[in-house]
Amino acid sequence: MAGAGGDTPQRASGPGNAAPSQATFLPEKPRQEQPLRRPAGELTQEDKLSVCSKLCYAIGGAPNQVATSATAFFLQIYLLDIAHITPFHASLVLFIGKVWGAVTDPVAGFFISKSKWTKIGRLMPWLVGCTPFTIVSYFFMWYLPPFVAGRVVWYLTFYCLFQALTTLFQVPYSALTMFLSSDQKERDSATAYRMTVEVLGTLIGAALHGQIVASAHASDHCAANLTVNAANSSSSLSNASNLAEPLGFQSHGREVYMIAAGVIGGVYLFGTFILFIGVKERDDPYALNSDKAIPFFKGLRLTMKHGPYLKLTVSFLLISTAVQLEQSNFVLFCTHAANLHNHFQYLVVTILVSAAVSIPFWQWFLQKFGKKSAACGISWMIPFAVMLVTIPNLVLAYVVAFVSGLSIAASLLLPWSMLPDVVDHFRLLNPHAKGHETIFYSSYVFFTKMSAGIGLGISAASLEFAGYKTGMCRQTSIVILTLKILIGAVPAILIMIGLSVLLFYPITEKSRKETEVALELLRRSHPSTDNLSENKNTWL
């Protein structure tokens, strides 16, 4: 924070000197009768968030991560080896589902931005209302229908529905960060809590789902089949039916996947309940009484022209695509390319435990050295992943899993910690705009989902072209090479390009603090929302 006392207004004019376009929004004659709502370096009781509130907020986002983690690690192998859908059709399901979820983001942002304040807030009704439907769609996404001809349509329908409903949850939940407190440090702290619990949720999703369904991908049945077919191994390698899973084993796989889906559905109910009872949503803490909600499409145009937002989005959509490729192909790589059938669930747990325990470290690091500096940790996974691809080894695999967890933690924490700074920067340039937060968050999720959908589609299509055979215990050398490229080379290139773009991100620690002080001046010099609780009754 800037210094306290009588020189606060002079130091607050820093952003105006650095960027003349901002100065026109700062009042020339502050109204002396209105003191600063929050003196520099001091938090009001309203801005201060309790540990309980931060934990409840963090727990509320965990179910989405539990389900998303299970989907990211296991949906592709489920479609290929349990549902016996061809790689081409699996790529269609994954790609169209992700694109549908991405398209839903700006639509959700539009309707959420039009929402009126209710007794439980403006965003909370969306979070509570979509949860039951999300649970139902998630369960049927893992259900193996008795018919074969329409399975692609079945999984496409429920995967698209699940993506749309998780969007209706994720957009208001992410935007809720801006309505917990007007203090940047408190919001960063809440984001760190959120990321820690979400990584734990990712761990629970992958570990819980992985342990339940591990027997569906055991190698014992493959060994039995290989023994039977040893006499004609050359023909069995070219014939999927000779090495395919027996019918009883497929039935077992269907049962364990449905059990896993039911357990994760219960996690959804628990997390949403904790969020509802433990988090108090505030209306826009920076809004002026004269503010009007910004029209959605006008806000979207302004968002797309905002330089810091564009650089941040381009950078992390590339990085998130790399992480998504690692997640979706890791189990396939362990199963078919690295001969680690019996270790993949433990390797996944290692990745996520490493990510969970390193979140506090990254939170300390970004506060100490800055958020852009913390981005260097994302690149740590590159050399180790390349080593695993070139030298498949069990010990090396665990080392790679640990380091990858460190990098994934940084890639999860940074964008959600930097996005509120971008929103604050936009607020300073557009002080009378209101309701733009959901536009920022929904469009950011849109671009990341779109890029992930394209990446997953290309990934599954690559396996199709390489000749991946569903249900086979042993794949060809071309398929193995394709998996190595998808795990090693492609993510490395995407991460390096993303970090290069991030170098041009303009918001520094100094400018971020100047923006915070300038926003305080705006609230001091205009009619503010001090009596917000009194005004709410008139809106109901």
Image (spheres, rainbow, N blue to C red):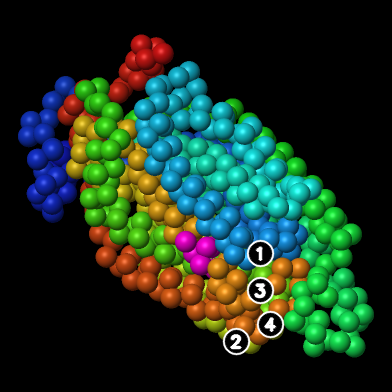
Residue placed under numbered mark 2 in the picture: 390
Q: In front of the other: label 1 or label 2?
A: 1
* x and y percentages locating residue 374 in the rendered image: 41, 64
Quarter-of-image position of residue 8: top left
- Residue 349 appears in the figure: no
Comparing 277 with 35, the one in front is 277
Does label 1 or label 2 sit earlier along the sequence? 1
- Quick one: which residue is furthest to the top in this view? 538
Q: Amino acid at mark 3?
A: Tyr
Q: Amino acid at mark 2?
A: Thr
Residue placed under numbered mark 4 in the picture: 476
Q: Amino acid at mark 4?
A: Thr
- Residue 524 appears in the figure: yes
Residue placed under numbered mark 3 in the picture: 468
Residue placed under numbered mark 1 in the picture: 86
- Dominant secondary structure of the residues highlighted in magenta in the image: helix
Residue drawn where x is 14% and y is 25% of the image: 32
Does label 2 or label 4 sit earlier along the sequence? 2
* Horizontal side, residue 141 vs residue 459: left or right: right
Looking at the image, residue 411 lies above or below residue 174: below
